[in-house]
């Protein structure tokens, strides 16, 4: 039978905007010692602003138009941001074919052109040559018909409560905070140092994130639990592997919400420590 305090715990959590899918997760949550999370949409807003467009053999407006068109079927925060910056409706009849390559970007056939939009990994994969760019930020490269035409520099903002959220985790007994991201090292390291995150692993493919979480699960003691917090489609595999999977519910993908054990209704990272606190109180674990 389930102790009555568990119902009170789940109820209390839901009043705080934390949806717990089962009482067993309260126990795991109360023993959470490692909190692993994704950067984009979890610690940052996941809404990128375009801070520069660098173009070579193509007009600036044309570059943004082709990038936005290529991204028009993607649900990635980067694609939403490029479409927002473009600001015009996309004529989908001109898009003949489109494929999203997770952790890389997109490849699309627009009119009679092959358009690549994505990171260094995507350019490397298709053998596109270009001069390295030293701007700090997330860089979205664009190539047309195998030829590099420029890049769009975008940047995301840290969520207002993110730093406090990391500090609070330590107050509720978390030993280590770990950030896993597909974004570039410069951006990842800056976010981690601004927020006082203990460890950061960057430029990871979705599968690398799964491997990293499995490695962490193997190294820790059985009674110490590991929570993963994420929001994207890519995060679903890690969310289901972690002892406790926590999804951002407001802007999170359906796949992440489905795979999670706990959903934060308002995407507020402060709610991670809050949920641990509620779980501990309900289990009367003294810390
Ligand atoms: P994260 O959620 O940690 O940022 P992702 O795997 O979603 O990781 O993305 C990793 C990187 O892959 C992004 O920073 C970006 O460089 C590139 N990328 C992924 N999807 C797209 C896309 N639709 N358009 C452009 N770049 C993308
Ligand atoms: Mg993500």
Image: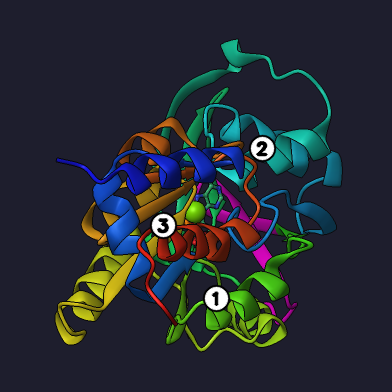
Q: Which residue is mark 3?
A: 282
> Do callouts 2 and 3 mark residues in contact (Cβ within 8 Å)?
no
Label placed on residue 80:
2
Q: CA distance from mark 2 to mark 3?
A: 40 Å
Q: CA distance from mark 1 to mark 2?
A: 31 Å
Residue 200: horizontal and vertical position, in percent? 48, 83
Residue 145 in magenta? yes
- Whether residue 195 is visible: yes
Query: Which label sits in the foreground, 2 or 3?
Result: 3
Q: Which residues are drawn in magenta?
A: 132-150
Q: Nearer the viewer, residue 278 or 168?
A: 278
Q: Which residue is mark 1?
A: 169
Of the 4 image quadrants, the one containing the C terminus is bottom left
**Label 3 residue near ligand 2, CB within 8 Å:** no
Query: Which label sits in the foreground, 3 or 1?
Result: 3
Horizontal side of 78 relative to 123 (left or right) equals right
Query: Which label sits in the foreground, 1 or 2?
Result: 1
Q: Please, what secondary structure does the residue beneath circle 1 have? A: helix
Label placed on residue 62:
none
Q: CA distance from mark 3 to mark 1?
A: 18 Å
* Residue 159 vertical placement versus 256 (above, below): below
Horizontal side of 216 relative to 43 (left or right) equals left
């Amino acid at each position: 039978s389930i102790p009555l305090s568990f119902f009170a715990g789940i109820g209390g959590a839901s009043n705080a905007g934390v949806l717990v899918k089962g009482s067993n997760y309260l126990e795991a949550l109360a023993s959470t010692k490692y909190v692993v999370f994704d950067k984009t949409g979890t610690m940052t807003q996941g809404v990128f602003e375009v801070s520069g467009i660098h173009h070579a053999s193509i007009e600036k407006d044309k570059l943004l138009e082709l990038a936005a068109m290529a991204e028009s079927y993607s649900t990635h925060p980067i694609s939403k941001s490029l479409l927002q910056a473009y600001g015009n409706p996309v004529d989908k009849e001109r898009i003949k074919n489109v494929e999203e390559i997770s952790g890389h970007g997109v490849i699309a056939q627009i009119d009679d052109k092959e358009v690549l939009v994505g990171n260094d990994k995507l350019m490397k994969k298709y053998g596109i040559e270009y001069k390295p760019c030293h701007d700090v930020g997330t860089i979205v490269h664009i190539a047309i018909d195998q030829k590099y035409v420029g890049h769009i520099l975008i940047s995301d903002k840290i969520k207002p409560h993110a730093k406090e959220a990391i500090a609070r985790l330590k107050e509720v007994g978390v030993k280590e905070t770990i950030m896993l991201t597909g974004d570039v090292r410069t951006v990842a390291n800056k976010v981690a140092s601004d927020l006082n995150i203990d460890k950061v692993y960057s430029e990871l493919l979705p599968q690398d994130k799964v491997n990293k979480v499995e490695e962490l699960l193997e190294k820790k003691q059985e009674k110490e639990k590991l929570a993963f917090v994420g929001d994207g489609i890519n995060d679903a595999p890690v969310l289901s592997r972690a002892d406790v999977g926590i999804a951002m519910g407001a802007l999170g993908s359906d796949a992440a919400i489905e795979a999670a054990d706990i959903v934060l209704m308002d995407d507020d990272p402060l709610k991670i420590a809050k949920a641990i606190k509620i779980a501990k109180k309900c289990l009367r674990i003294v810390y």
